[in-house]
Amino acid sequence: SDGTAYGDTLFSDTVLAAKELPASLRDLISDVNAVHNRLHNDGVPRSEYKDWEMLPDAIHPVLRKHPLTGEEALFVGPAYVSGLVGLEPTESFEVLAKLYRHMLQPCYVYRHRWQEGDLVVWDNARTLHKATTLDMPSGLERRMWRVQTLGPGW
């Protein structure tokens, strides 16, 4: 590598996005559950999952309470959410697209540009995060170590 940093991580503040959710969108999702499954991958099959057994779906409210602060947070993301319970697929897609457009606005997103030696700590119950590894040239590796704490969480 030429020393260029690749593989930034984007963090979206789902609590602030929930607080500033337009009333019309809040009304649509106030009592709606989302279907989560890590095999969804935004609808794009992942080769590393080909030999895995199919994982069961998990159902979670679109708006959840943070386990420590009690604040309301949006709990949806394109990587794992395949639809909304009780809505037709087309309506589900449209509502999710509106939610993603809202919560991924620049005012809710922090982009971390990794440098050697960085340490980043985030609240997984408050943030949606995504790596930008698709921007990386072929053959480069993104290497990091992850540590998780015990305690209430999602």
Image (spheres, grey):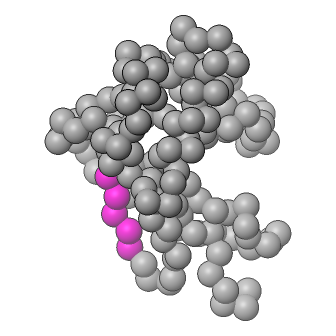
Q: Residue at x 26, y 45 (%)?
A: 150
Magenta residue check for 145: no
Residue 64, above or below 127: above
- On the image, the x and y values in percent for residue 112 come to 48, 71
Dividing the picture into quarters, in which one does residue 52 lie? top right
Q: Residue furthest bottom?
A: 2
The answer to which of 68 and 47 lies nearer the viewer is: 68
The answer to which of 140 and 4 lies nearer the viewer is: 4
Confirm whether residue 129 shows in the render: no
Q: Residue at x 82, y 69 (%)?
A: 138
Specify whether 119 is left or right of 149: right
Magenta residue span:
119-124
Specify whether 8 is left or right of 121: right
- On the image, the x and y values in percent for residue 77 come to 53, 39
Magenta residue check for 120: yes
Q: Residue at x 73, y 91 (%)?
A: 2
For the image shown, how many numbered marks are present on the structure?
0
Q: Quadrant of the C terminus?
A: top left
